[in-house]
Image (tube, rainbow, N blue to C red):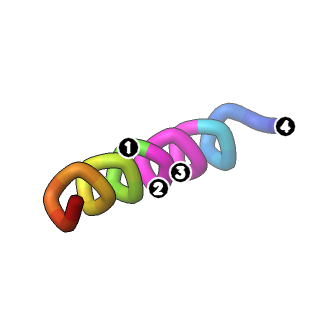
Amino acid sequence: MNNLAYKTYNIESIKNEFLNIGFS
């Protein structure tokens, strides 16, 4: 996995966790 893909994946993961916390 290259750096950009890894960063993008990280951002998506953090966003998803934030949404999960927000909606739970």
Label 1 with label 2: CB-CB less than 8 Å: yes
Indicate the secondary structure of the residue bearing disc 2: helix
Mark positioned earlier in the residue sequence (3 or 4) = 4
Residue type at mark 3 is Thr
Indicate the secondary structure of the residue bearing disc 1: helix
Look at mark 3 in the image and give the residue it sits on: 8
- Which disc number belongs to residue 1? 4
Label 3 with label 4: CB-CB less than 8 Å: no
Look at mark 1 in the image and give the residue it sits on: 14
Which residue shows up at 67% across the image and 48% down it?
5
Mark positioned earlier in the residue sequence (4 or 1) = 4
Above-or-below relation of 1 to 8: above
Which residue shows up at 51% across the image and 40% down it?
10
Look at mark 2 in the image and give the residue it sits on: 12
Camera-nearest label, 1 or 3: 1
Q: Which residues are magenta?
A: 7-13
Question: Could you say which is closer to the camera, residue 5 or residue 9?
Answer: 9
Task: Give x and y (percent) for residue 16.
Answer: 40, 57
Q: Residues within 10 Å of mark 1 (few under 14, many from 20)?
A: few
Residue 8 on the magenta span: yes
Disc 1 from disc 3: Cα separation: 10 Å
Residue type at mark 4 is Met
Residue type at mark 1 is Ile
Indicate the secondary structure of the residue bearing disc 4: loop
